[in-house]
Amino acid sequence: DAKTTQPTSMDCAEGRAANLPCNHSTISGNEYVYWYRQIHSQGPQYIIHGLKNNETNEMASLIITEDRKSSTLILPHATLRDTAVYYCIVSRLSNAGNMLTFGGGTRLMVKP
Amino acid sequence: DVKVTQSSRYLVKRTGEKVFLECVQDMDHENMFWYRQDPGLGLRLIYFSYDVKMKEKGDIPEGYSVSREKKERFSLILESASTNQTSMYLCASRKRGAVGTQYFGPGTRLTVL
């Protein structure tokens, strides 16, 4: 299974873009990159996913390098409510479809 | 909105007790999952189910069993609780398909004394 490497923690000023990096150098061709976040005392929340192309939704943008060995999640205008642990996940296939293996994640602190 | 509910937010049990953690989802999802979350270890998959009465072991199934008698309900069972099973337990569900969002419940914090 492909593993991911993320910084343990990051700070970001409120209103600025938060760029969260993730390395997944052993990713296979059919594996997706997912991002989830977990706000304190809540279950993880889906943010975005991608295979090869860059993706954008109402929450964030996902930039995947051409070789797919790394990606960056971008929160364009971080708010205090974006303070959370962000998980970069590379999926693996099973009978239930894509399975998610959560690592340690990046603790993002958005500061006023 | 998808809703995944778990029977308790907090639970305290004694060593050796049989513990049932219940999870219910209201979106007719085929796939359901049980994870545990511990500091420094992230979320680890215990068991998952891809259909009624179907189950597969995840990464850490030892000491646990599961039951899926109805599509909307997925139960995690600790046959004889031990102190090393003190943890946050998270349930999730997802519609069948190769690519799909997992929706998580709020979690149950279980303490085994």
Image: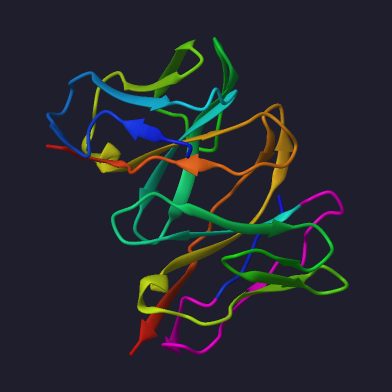
Query: Considering depth in this image, is B62 or A13 the residue closer to the camera?
Result: A13
Q: Look at 69% across and 49% down and name the residue there.
A: A91
The colour scheme is: rainbow
Q: Quadrant of the C terminus of chain A?
A: bottom left
* A6 over A4 or under it: above or below: below
Q: Is residue A23 left or right of residue B111?
A: right
* A17 over B62 or under it: above or below: below
Query: Considering depth in this image, is A27 or B104 the residue closer to the camera?
Result: B104
Query: Considering depth in this image, is B21 or A56 the residue closer to the camera?
Result: A56
* B10 over A69 or under it: above or below: above
Q: Is residue A70 left or right of residue B58?
A: right
Q: Is residue B45 left or right of residue B23?
A: right
Q: Look at 39% across and 82% down and name the residue there.
A: A110
Can you give x and y, in whole percent of width and height, for residue A88 in the image?
60, 63
**Per the image, is A25 magenta?**
yes
Can you give x and y, in whole percent of width and height, for residue B112 in the image?
17, 36
Q: Is residue A103 left or right of residue A9?
A: right
Q: Look at 32% across and 32% down and name the residue there.
A: B6
Residue A57: which quarter of the image?
A: bottom right
* Magenta-drawn segment: A7-31
Can you give x and y, in whole percent of width and height, for residue A62 in the image?
69, 69
Can you give x and y, in whole percent of width and height, for residue B103 in the image?
50, 41
* A39 over B79 or under it: above or below: below
Query: Considering depth in this image, is A101 or A38 the residue closer to the camera?
Result: A38
Residue A55: which quarter of the image?
A: bottom right
Q: Look at 35% across and 87% down and name the residue there.
A: A111
Total marks placed: 0
**Per the image, is A81 magenta?**
no
